Amino acid sequence: MNQSAPGDAILDYDAARQRMVDAQIRPVQINDPRIVAAMRVLPREACVPDSLRAIAYADQSLELGHGRVLTEPRIAGRMVQIAEPEAGQRALVVGAGTGYVAALLARLGLKVVALESDAALSAIGKRFCAVEAPDVVWRDGKLAAGAAGDSPFDLIMIDGAVRAVPPALAGQLAAHGRVVCVIWPEGGVAAASIGEPSATGLATRPVFDVALPLLPELEPAPAFAF
């Protein structure tokens, strides 16, 4: 069931959603039929404030305030694809925001916990998931702390860029789990990356370059020079 707002009658969101998939999703090698099918039905317009609904399917990330964004469709889809999600796996979405990625994973059959620290964003996300992905469990808390009470996770997705994966999150992975996020090293190039446990800690490897803003809450504190 799609959620609506005043003025929606003049906009054909279903048609816009199909154009998004055909013009933005399929051309960038998002070829998992499960992801394509889910993105054809999930209403992104319900994941933004009313003022942004008309551009919900634009090929760009949409600013939600306080440095947060609704991730561009092609980036969200590619990141979910490289995560190789499997039905029945336990997943944590860190910085779940307004719930789009959490709902997408839930539509693929994963057991999803959505972690968000911004009350305004999580309020939108909870309403969205109550309709589109009611099995998603929402947690309110600090992003760097993860959701230890729900761990271990087969998959942790961080919906935003980070300088490095917070140690607490890496510690909440199952033995054969993986973290998927955008890692943007200081002075380097941001890349969608996969991190997996190793004998020396979390081993990460870049998969594709991407432009996505840093999650403000997970930016490291500035160093003091003496």
Image: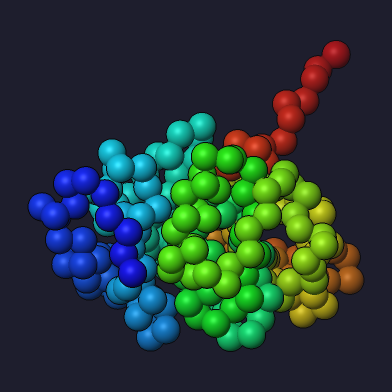
Residue 87, located in which quarter of the rendered image?
A: bottom right
Residue at image location 77% in from the left, 66% down from the top: 150
Seen in the picture, residue 10 relative to 193 is either above or below; the reply is above
Quadrant location of residue 15?
bottom left
The reply, left or right, for residue 194 in relation to residue 159 is right
Residue at image position (64%, 43%) is: 117
Q: Quadrant of the N terminus?
A: bottom left
- Residue at the spot x=79%, y=68% of the render? 151
Is the residue 32 above or below the residue 130 in the image? below
Instruction: State the image coordinates of residue 170 (x, y, percent, origin top left).
Output: 78, 61
Instruction: Tell which of 31 and 57 is nearer to you.
Output: 57
Q: Position of residue 176 (x, y in %)?
A: 77, 80
State the residue in front, 82 or 42. Answer: 42
Q: How is the image coloured?
A: rainbow
Quarter of the image for the C terminus: give it: top right
Circle count: 0
- Residue at the farthest left position: 10
**Residue in view at x 50 percent, y 80 percent:** 108
- Does residue 153 appear to the left or right of 51 in the view shown? right
Q: Is residue 82 visible?
A: no
Residue 62 sits in quarter: top left
Residue 201 is left or right of residue 25, and the answer is right
Q: Nearer the viewer, residue 200 or 112?
A: 112
Q: Residue furthest right?
A: 199
Compared with residue 222, is residue 111 higher up or lower down, i.e. above or below?
Answer: below
Q: Is residue 47 visible?
A: yes
Image position, residue 59 (x, y; %): 29, 54
